[in-house]
Image: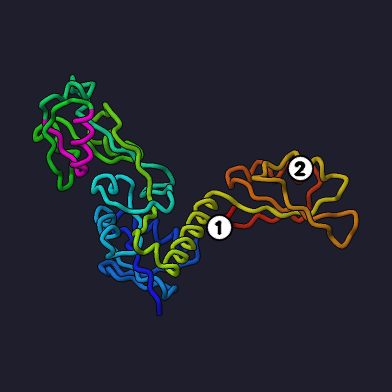
Amino acid sequence: MKKLKIGLPKGSLQENTFELFKKAGFKIFAEARQYKPYCDDEELDITLVRAQEIPKYVESGVFDCGITGYDWILETNAKVKNICELIYAKSGFRPVRWVVAVPEDSNINSITQLKNKRIATELVNYVKKYFKKKNIPVKVEFSWGATEIKVPDLVDAIVELTETGNSLKANKLKIIEEVLISTTRFIANYEALKDNWKKEKIETLSLLLRGALEAEGMVGLKMNVEKKNLEKIEKVLPALKKPTISQLSDPNWVAVEVIIKEQEVKKIIPQLKKCGAEGIIEYPLNKVVY
């Protein structure tokens, strides 16, 4: 059987990645210390590794494709094909930011004040390039973790990954510069894409994963509407496109189906009812493919 070797991130992104694949139609099972999980698609050969390592493994052909962060592609300078952007992270469906942070009570309010200062980060190569481009000489050192507690005793500033900023605030740090906005990416090896079977499998994965993300926060609504009330119903519905309208057996009635944001449902259903809609059904979506 042909296999597509894919690297998925182990750690903070693992749970959300598994959930995304589940919505896309692929069930993945892994125990706590397992690095070769089971997938119900036997054509996928999955290995769990740190997101930081995936770009180089994809570049070298150890993996045909993988999911990692844009930040780690830049950090490793990996030569890989960006298949698609998948905007999700550890805490939600949003980009993440790498920021320069210093203690709240520090008199440093600009990165220009970091000249010849010490900076700790996990994103060493990118941060060095960033400050070099700004013509600000700094000493950048690799942080093995717990980066927030290193200022001001061990270093003068840190460049740290944040989604909400809550961890930085909890450690009494303030942000003085945003150096990179990163999103999750589905990447592939250039040689793997020359194989027609692998290319088609990668493109199928991309389509289904993007469809699963598009469906996030969306629901479907179905209802029966008397034709005389159809115009009023259409004005209420904030459809992605025009609603789907199907003729019922009764010539005076139609079925109306639409996709809307889940947060809007509680406001819209009472309005639909007032406008004459009947048999209203709300249902979840796994994928929305355009």
- Residue type, numbered disc 1: Lys
Image location (x, y in percent) of residue 193: 39, 62
In the picture shown, does residue 265 fall above or below 65? above
In the picture shown, does residue 181 fall above or below 279? above
Which residue is depicted at the point 39% across and 58% down? 17
Query: Image quarter for residue 240?
Result: top right
- Residue 287, numbered label: 1
The reply, left or right, for residue 62 in relation to residue 290 is: left
Q: Give the dominant element type of the magenta stretch: helix, strand or loop.
A: helix
Point out the stretch of residues depicted in magenta. 118-133
Image location (x, y in percent) of residue 2: 40, 76
Q: Is residue 72 magenta?
A: no
Residue farthest bottom in this picture = 1
Query: Image quarter for residue 114?
Result: top left
The reply, left or right, for residue 226 in relation to residue 66 is: right
Give the SS element for disc 1. loop
Which residue is depicted at the point 77% across and 43% down? 233
Image location (x, y in percent) of residue 173: 23, 31
In the picture shown, does residue 104 fall above or below 13? above
Q: Which residue is mark 2?
A: 234
Can you say which quadrant of the picture contains the N terminus? bottom left
Q: Residues within 10 Å of mark 2 (few under 14, many from 20)?
A: some
Q: Nearer the viewer, residue 125 or 19?
A: 125
Q: CA distance from mark 1 to mark 2?
A: 24 Å
